[in-house]
Image: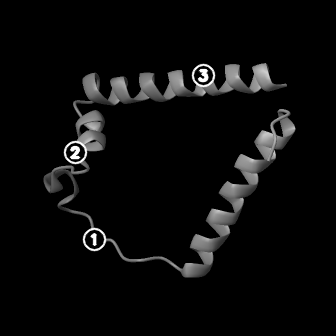
Amino acid sequence: YHHLGADILVGLVGVHVVANLAYQFAKGDNPIGAMVSGRKPADAYADQPAATGGSPVTAFVCLAAAAAIVFGGIKAFGGLL
């Protein structure tokens, strides 16, 4: 299972890289620069309302779900916790 998990992860990383390159060159967006600098020009979002904080309960549920997915995946593919 461990090797299968690694192959799946490599495939997902490949999909991520291809998607970012597609946004970079096909759509003219700059996600790679934004990831490196941590900033994105605001003009692309000028017509959007200001972001507001979400619910702490929702944040905790998302965190718990992410932890369950990560640790469940490690356990399912034979890793040690």
User: Distance of mark 2 from mark 3, alpha carbons?
Assistant: 25 Å
Q: Which residue shows up at 29% across the image and 34% down it?
A: 32
Residue at label 2? 37
Which sits earlier in the primary sequence, circle 1 or circle 3?
A: 3
**Image location of residue 45, percent across then percent down:** 22, 57
Foreground disc of the pair 1, 3: 3
Residue 65 position, x and y percent, is 70, 60
Residue 51: % across, % down: 33, 71
* In this picture, residue 13 sits left or right of residue 40: right
Residue 15 shown left or right of residue 37 in the figure = right
Per the image, the residue denoted by label 3 is 10
Please tell me the numbered disc located at residue 49: 1
Q: Which residue is drawn at 60% across and 22% down?
A: 10
Q: What residue type is labelled 1?
A: Pro
Of labels 1 and 2, the one closer to you? 2
Q: Which amino acid does label 2 sit on?
A: Ser
Tell me the SS state at disc 2: helix
